[in-house]
Structures are given as C-alpha cells and as structure tokens.
Image: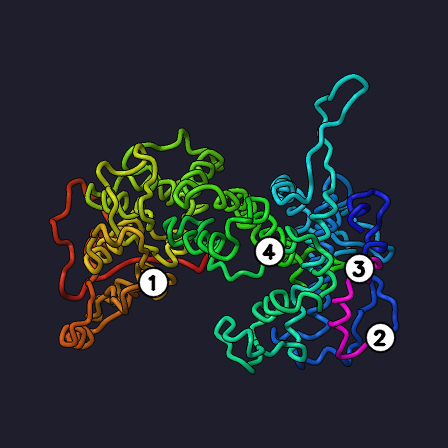
C-alpha cells in the first residue's frame, strides 16, 4: 500500500481492497458480517446492523466504519495532490471508482456542485502538502540530471511514516464499540482516574490502555518501529490543546500552549520532535475530513460543511503549532501573529510596531472578516481604552517570557494573571449594525473589570484566568440598552480563582452579592447609549476608576466561533 499510494496507476478501488491488510478493521464487523463485496453503491454493513447499539459515540456501527474508511480515503487523496487527489478529495468517485471532474454547477453526479467547485478552486492545497511534508509523510527530493542536480523537486513517499498513519487510522476508533472496552487490571490501577476492575468508558483512554499494556493485541501497532510507536502514542495524549484559541488568538500564549508543551516533555521525555507534532495534526485533519459517513462522495465535512476561510486558517497554523517542540509558547504565538498580518487579505500594510502592536495583531485574528473595521476604529478609542487593550492583550500568561520589546507597552514587565476572554472572537466577528468602536470599548471595559478582580502581581505571571462572556455574545447593543432601561446591570462576577462570568443582574441580585462578599464589578458602558446609541471617540484618559455602582449597560453582538 505505502509504496503505491501516490502512484498514478494505483486506484482507489485497489486501495480500498488492500485495506483488508489491517485486521483491526474486522472489529467493526463484530455486530454483523456481510459477504457482499464493497463497491461505490454498496454498504459494508447491512441495514439491519445500523441500530445504535453498543457504540459509545451514539452513531451506528456502519457509520463508524464508513467514517474510518473516509479517513483512509482522505489520506489517499492528500498523498496524490499532484495527480487525481484534488478531484477525489473534492468530488468523490463515480460508479467505476474514477475521480469526478465537475463540468459545472449543474453537474448532477454530485450534490452541492457549486460548493465543491468553490472548495476545489480556493482551498489552500499547498498548506495540505506542507503539513504532510512537515509530518515526514512526503519528502522533497531534488531530481538529478546526467551531470548535476537540477531545480526540479519531486515528492517521495516515506513508506515507514505512511504505514504508521494508516495503522493509527485503522484502530483509532475501535474502542467506540462498548463490547471491547478494557477493564483496568489491579497491577495497572489507577489509570487516568479508573480504578481496578473499572471498565474504561472513554474510548481514547481505552485505546491508550491497550497500547500501553497490551500492544500485541493490535497487530498493526505491534509491527511498527519503536520511533513510530512513540509518534502513534503521542496522538492519544490528552493535550489540553484548543486549536481555536490559537488560530483566533483568543487566548494568551500560556493558556494555549503551556499544558501542551508540558505533555511533550513530561510524557515523552523530549523524544518527540516537530515532525511528530505535525503527524498528530495530520491524523486530526484526516480524521475530521472523513467525519461524514459518505467516503465515496469525497471529504464532504470539509468540502460542503466547514467554512473555507476557517479551514485555511487552521491549515496555515499547523506549521506554527509544530514549532512548540523547539520554541517557547510566546515565540510561537508571536511568529504566528506576524504571519497572519503579513498574509492578511486585503493587505493591511507594514507590520505594526509600538505599544499596541500585539493587541492589533491579535484583534486581526479575532475579528477575521471584520478586521479592517476593528483595526481602523482602534485608533479612535480613548487613550485609556487603547492602553488597557494594549497592556492586557500583551500579557503572556507564562513565567519569564515576553513578546518582543518593540511590540508591547514600555515597562510592561512580568505580571499576571493574563486573561482569556472566552468568545472574544465571536464578540467581534458579527458586528451587525453595531460599530466596531463600541465593541472595542466594551472589550476594554471587560479587561478593566477583570483587572480589578485580579490585581496584577509578579507571582501570577504564569497564570491565565478565563473571562466568560457567553451571555452577551448573541445580544445587540439595542438588547443591552433595553436591559438597562429595565433597571438591570451587566456585571462581571468572579466565580472562583480561575474564571469570571458576565451576568445580567437585578438590584436585588447585586445586594445579595454585596452581602455575601461575592467578588464582582459592574461594567460602566454609559457611553454606549450616548448620542442616540452611537459611542463617540473619547479623546482623553478616563478617570482612574471607571467602574460605576448602579444600573449600567454594555453592548455586544456576536455568534459563536470555532473553538
């Protein structure tokens, strides 16, 4: 399989047939077998076996099998981008297993032909290829002529690495079938919180248990080289990594990367490298690409059900995440922010420098399509609001790390905690009829209130606190003003030492919080309703204390973003 996977003469039909080499796939057929060959119009599992019984994901046995086959097909197509891979990934195959080349938006051989054409035209295929190169699945080789090496680059398959990915794909989801979930043996207890005699219900932990203690039960894993087994084991780690936080610059570097980096060091004793991190993301990507149980119709999850700009941002970011094996959290984040500014479309001009540079680059990522408006209005904020955003968005949430001095406020120093404004991107991405200036003023006030609840100090430099703004992310400014007209306030309430929530509060609730000494701050957004609801630029610094006690309002409208 591995030696032929990129060959023009190796068809998807042959690849599908060769997948029988992975015995773990037979586990999906324990419920009911069929002797019918698999073809483009045939399902490997009979209709009677598709009852949602014994599958932890809630899907049918047939669906889980087809999703696994979809992940295999995604690997097959992405290994063949110089040939028929783009057509197959985007459009699937016909009844003869031939990749479909669409003739136009009315082509009846596929569903949603217009979306498929748009995806095929605008997907960043080079990002897919680069990720596969970074993961060691493809190797760039200079083609040699008679007397010297010329400038032509040819992609060569690394068979050992591809075998590892195919093997992982074969057994990755088998523990979703409850009938084969392992029971923790006394000599292995406790295991990820499970005691002796407990059935490991989490399918990822269940697979990890087998890989750790009974690897011989999975022949495809047993046959891999030691270094490749380490790479496969790494994909099963619970890395506490939220990719959306990174792609949208929603969180400070410490919140994004510290636990991820610790897992690399703690669990793998630095035996992993950047290639292994890229391998992790290739597996994540191909698994998601095959998420729809219709593998013969192409990778529909990405082609028709995933926003293309978001997918392209994710693909571009993988290269930077892989650097965490050799760089600090803050270095990785800074490099990523600079790349996003340099590659912004439409172009935004030279990379910013000075005290607000990091804040502006993060706002670019957070606001996405609204970035030009948000960045333009940033300069019309009051000096106080600009300073708050510049300072708070430049904190790293890591010990002994700072962004480059020419990109952050002078004398920022090492203090914390840093703040993760959860749903901050959603807050900026759907402005509707509201102005970007208003949103930025609200965001500054949220940071200001958070700092009142968590005063900056050096001992907290390596800490990140989550500020949840869920309750206002779907509200318009008119909605928020209406709440104030009824005598209510918008408050930031400290629930514990790690998080605070924006809440709508009546006077009675405020009094109860005061009586119970609950930590909270009332958001002062009085200018939100000024001049008929139009927030005006404030040209001078605000008073030292901007928090008012009493009914005030806040403004935001946003929808959830990828996280």
Mark before the other along the chain sequence, 3 or 4: 3
Q: Which residues are magenta?
A: 16-33
Picture disc at residue 19: 3
Color style of the picture:
rainbow
Horizontal and vertical percent position of residue 459:
24, 53
Residue at image mark 4: 284
As helix, strand or loop, the secondary structure at mark 4 comes to helix
Q: Residue furthest top?
A: 147
Query: Relative to 126, is 443 above or below?
Result: below
In this rendering, position of residue 516 left or right of residue 91: left
Q: CA distance from mark 3 to mark 2?
A: 16 Å
Picture disc at residue 34: 2
Q: CA distance from mark 1 to mark 4?
A: 27 Å
Identify the residue at image location x=84%, y=65%.
38
Mark before the other along the chain sequence, 4 or 2: 2
- Mark 1 or 4: the one toward you: 4
In this rendering, position of residue 140 left or right of residue 250: right
Mark before the other along the chain sequence, 2 or 1: 2
28 falls in the magenta region: yes
Mark before the other along the chain sequence, 1 or 4: 4
- The main secondary structure of the magenta stretch is helix
Residue at image mark 1: 468
Q: Residue furthest front?
A: 187
Identify the residue at image location x=23%, y=43%.
387
Camera-side residue of 334 and 228: 228
């Amino acid at each position: 399989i591995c030696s032929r996977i990129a060959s023009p003469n190796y068809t998807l039909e042959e690849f599908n047939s060769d997948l029988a080499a992975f015995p773990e796939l037979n586990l999906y057929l324990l419920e009911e077998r069929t002797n019918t060959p698999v073809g483009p119009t045939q399902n490997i599992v009979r209709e009677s076996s598709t009852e949602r019984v014994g599958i932890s994901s809630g899907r049918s046995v047939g669906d889980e099998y087809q999703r696994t086959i979809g992940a295999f097909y995604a690997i097959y197509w992405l290994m063949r981008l110089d040939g028929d891979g783009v057509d197959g990934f985007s459009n699937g195959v016909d009844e003869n297993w031939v990749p479909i080349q669409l003739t136009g938006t009315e082509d009846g051989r596929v569903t949603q032909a217009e979306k498929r054409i748009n995806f095929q035209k605008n997907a960043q295929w080079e990002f897919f290829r680069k990720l596969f190169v970074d993961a060691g699945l493809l190797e760039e080789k200079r083609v040699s002529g008679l007397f010297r090496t010329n400038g032509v680059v040819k992609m060569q398959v690394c068979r050992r690495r591809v075998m590892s990915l195919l093997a992982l794909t074969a057994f990755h989801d088998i523990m979703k079938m409850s009938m084969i979930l392992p029971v923790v043996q006394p000599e292995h207890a406790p295991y990820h919180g499970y005691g002796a005699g407990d059935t490991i219900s989490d399918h990822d932990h269940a697979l990890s248990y087998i890989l750790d203690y009974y690897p011989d039960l999975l022949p495809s894993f047993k046959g891999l080289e030691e270094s490749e087994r380490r790479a496969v084991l790494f994909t099963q780690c619970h890395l506490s990594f939220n990719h959306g936080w990174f792609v949208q610059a929603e969180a400070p570097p410490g919140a994004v990367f510290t636990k991820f980096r610790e897992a690399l060091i703690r669990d793998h004793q630095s035996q992993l490298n950047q290639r292994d991190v890229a391998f992790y993301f290739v597996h994540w990507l191909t698994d998601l690409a095959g998420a729809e149980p219709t593998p013969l119709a192409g990778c529909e999850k990405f082609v028709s059900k995933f926003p293309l700009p978001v997918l392209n941002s994710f693909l571009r970011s993988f290269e930077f995440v892989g650097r965490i094996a050799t760089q600090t959290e803050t270095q990785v984040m800074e490099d990523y922010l600079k790349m996003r500014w340099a590659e912004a479309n439409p172009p935004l001009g030279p990379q910013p420098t000075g005290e607000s540079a990091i804040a502006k680059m993060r706002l670019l990522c957070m606001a996405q399509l609204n970035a030009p408006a948000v960045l333009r209005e940033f300069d019309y904020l009051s000096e106080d609001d600009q300073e708050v955003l510049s300072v708070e968005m430049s904190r790293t949430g890591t010990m002994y790390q700072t962004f480059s001095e020419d990109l952050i406020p002078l004398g920022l120093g090492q203090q914390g905690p840093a703040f993760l404004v959860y749903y901050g991107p959603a807050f900026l991405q759907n402005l509707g009829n509201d102005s970007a200036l208003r949103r930025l003023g609200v965001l500054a006030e949220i940071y200001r209130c958070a700092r009142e609840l968590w005063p900056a100090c050096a001992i907290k430099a390596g800490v990140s606190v989550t500020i949840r703004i869920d309750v206002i992310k779907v509200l318009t400014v008119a909605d928020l003003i209406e709440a104030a007209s009824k005598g209510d306030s918008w408050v930031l309430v400290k629930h514990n030492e790690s998080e605070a929530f924006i809440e709508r509060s009546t006077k009675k609730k405020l009094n109860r919080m005061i009586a119970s000494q609950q930590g909270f701050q009332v958001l002062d957004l009085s200018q939100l309703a000024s001049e008929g609801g139009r927030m005006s630029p404030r040209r001078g610094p605000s008073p030292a204390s901007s928090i008012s006690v009493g009914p005030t309002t806040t403004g935001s409208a946003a929808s959830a973003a990828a996280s």
